[in-house]
Image (cartoon, grey):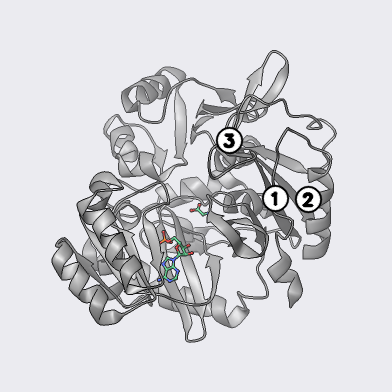
Amino acid sequence: MKVLVIGSGGREHALAWKLKQSPRVTQVFCAPGNGGIAQDATCVPIRITEHAALIEFAQREGIALTVVGPDDALAAGIVDHFQAAGLRAFGPTQRAAQLESSKVFAKDFMVRHGIPCARSASFDDPIAAQAYAQKIGAPMVVKADGLALGKGVLICHSQGEAARAIYDIMERRAFGEAGRRIVIEEFLEGEECSIHALVDGRSYLMFPGAQDHKRALDGDEGLNTGGMGTFSPPAHLLTPELEQRVRTDVLDRFISGLAKDGLDFRGMLFPGLMITRDGLRVLEFNCRFGDPETQVLLTRLDSDFLALLEATIDQQLAQVSAQWKPDAAVCVVMASGGYPGKYATGLPIAGLDASEALVFHAGTRREDSGIVTAGGRVLGVTALGPTLAAARDRAYAAVAKIHFEGSQHRSDIAAKGLRA
Ligand code: AMP
Ligand code: GLY
């Protein structure tokens, strides 16, 4: 059967790469894809916002399953549109995807169903928001309700910063309509952990944990990014006891909450957790695969990925299981110099052919001369190893052989997992 992946990043490269290995998949397409995805899939130049054109393509090609990567496509109702056209698409509907696209919706859901999270309140009135901020005191976190390209969360260390953040988001509309409402919540201290679970509305299938590195520089310094690297499993953090808590306090309650609210969620649920001294707290629900979490998770997956996605859509997750390689996986992101600020593109990338690791392309383009850079995050160099240290060493050995002008990467990916 033919499958279509929607998106153009490293996550979508990993999705396409894994789907290609499925015995029942004859051809993988990716819209729009990128220079590296073209090695594993047929790239189709249709943008993710062009739903009608994507549907027309899927119908013409006889695509049996479309897998949606990015959150904004889900929030725009791409799965609803595919379903209305009689096409199968993996991912939640627009209504269910509000669990990611509206932080107010997500917090209400968590509170209503007893899912542990930071104490918070939601506001559509800046004066009431300012009064609450005065009351709870710094540090606190001010969040724009809607999607803001990962920039709508402001950590405020003083009352002044909080006042400014509320003004910027609600009155100056720094993130546009996403800032019509805000959530203000207590600042939580701890270590973050990425959970992934396929959810079919009745049951779930939990993946191994992963840990992302969101800051640009070593030691978690510098600006926030889309993610500079990941590893799995984060055994130092996600102990068997904590994993059991994730099941009982987050996933079980999520499933029963869906039933109580009459919410049809079928897709990937990716809760971002903060592990605090007082236990786990859900920071956010993402309704899609993480990037670059997907790169390490799918590298470790030892089962037919297509079958898992189909079981999710068909509400058969209780009948399937997934096998995972015992190996650890590490993904090191190579980014353009200057990222997450301004950076150059079009720079030739050398050393890709010699690589012994899996190289998932995030921001690349194919030109007659070869592969060149085309984005902030350029490559996700991913390796497996019998231990986390071995996987880390393999990934970095591969990074050392790849070159483009100005390339930057963190040199401490997986260090937290190795310190213990
Ligand atoms: P979110 O989009 O809500 O996950 O927020 C993005 C990032 O902001 C998270 O990955 C955390 O690093 C940080 N963050 C969000 N909420 C909190 C909180 N209540 N306390 C501390 N850090 C937070
Ligand atoms: N790696 C974090 C995310 O995909 O949101």
The residue indicated by pointer 2 is 395
Residue 66 sits above or below residue 158 on the image: above
Dot 1 or dot 2, earlier in sequence: 1
Is the residue under label 2 in contact with that under label 1 (CB below 8 Å)? Answer: yes
Dot 3 or dot 1, earlier in sequence: 1
Q: Residues within 10 Å of mark 2 (few under 14, many from 20)?
A: many
Residue 312 sits above or below residue 220 on the image: above
Residue in the foreground of this view, choosing between 121 and 9 = 121
Residue in the foreground of this view, choosing between 187 and 117 = 187
The residue indicated by pointer 3 is 343
Q: Residue at position x 24%, y 77% from top?
A: 134
Instruction: Let me know if residue 53 appears in the view.
Output: yes
Residue 34 sits above or below residue 260 on the image: above
Discs 2/3, front: 3
Quadrant location, the C terminus: bottom right
Q: How far from the left and from the top, in percent, is residue 407?
A: 70, 39
